[in-house]
Image: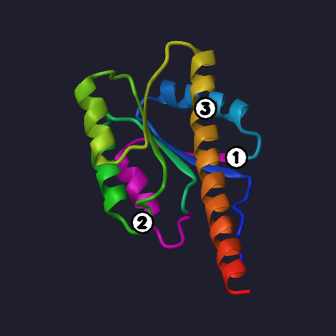
Amino acid sequence: MQIKLKSTRLNAILVEDNPDDRRLFENAFSETWMKSSLLLFRDGLQFLNYLNRAGAPIPDIIFLDLDMPVMGGLAALGHLRRSAKYSTVPVAIYSHSSSETDILDALEIGANVYITKPESYEKLRGLIKEVIQIHWAQGALAINRKWAATTTNQASHS
């Protein structure tokens, strides 16, 4: 069994209706990860329409705002978690709300992490970096587990 290592290029998506918040996130993201692409969408429906196109790549991580017109973040998250293709993609909710109800709802539907939008650019950059590092570390752990299982299995057949 051969284990395929994922590229070090990070392909991320931000779904955010506020143009100022999109621009701020885009700038902070570009300073956080050297080899990356960030696709931007205005609302959950535009985002899901993109994902449902034939040949749309599976993103490495998705940042979703909660409160958006047309389709909000929780509805979009629900669609992702019911999709066989996208159900395991890490999703970070990125919202101004710090309501316990919003946080619990997002986590219950399947968000991996909930980020309250910080008040400073430096904090935003740090949060993005931290979320990406956690995501990458989880990916490395999964690869190590596959490798360990493969080598253990091969040793037992020798």
Mark 2 secondary-structure assignment: loop
- Contact (Cβ within 8 Å) of mark 1 with mark 2: no
Q: How many residues crowd mark 2 within 10 Å: few (<14), some (14–19), many (20+)?
A: few
In the rendered picture of this protein, how many numbered marks are placed on residues? 3
Quick check: 94 left or right of 56?
left
Position in image of residue 85 (x %, y %):
44, 67
Which quadrant of the figure has residue 130?
A: top right
Residue beneath the point at 62% across and 61% down: 145
Question: Which residue in the structure is indicated by mark 1?
Answer: 36
Residue type pointed to by label 1: Ser
Mark closest to the chain's N terminus, 3 or 1: 1
Q: CA distance from mark 3 to mark 2?
A: 29 Å
- Reply above or below: 43 against 147: above
Label 1's element?
strand
**Mark 2 or mark 3, which is nearer the start of the sequence?**
2
Image x and y of residue 4, in percent: 70, 70
Give the residue at x 65% y 61%. 143
Query: Which residue is under mark 3?
Result: 130
Q: Nearer the viewer, residue 13 or 10?
A: 10
Closest to the observer, 6 or 1: 1
150 is within the stretch colored magenta? no
Q: Position of residue 95 (x, y in %)?
A: 39, 28
Judged by depth in the image, the label closer to the viewer, 1 or 2, is 1
Identify which amino acid the numbered label 2 is placed on.
Asn
Write down the residue under mark 2. 52
The boundaries of the magenta stretch are: 36-57
Q: Quadrant of the N terminus?
A: bottom right
Tell me which numbered mark, 1 or 2, is placed earlier along the sequence: 1
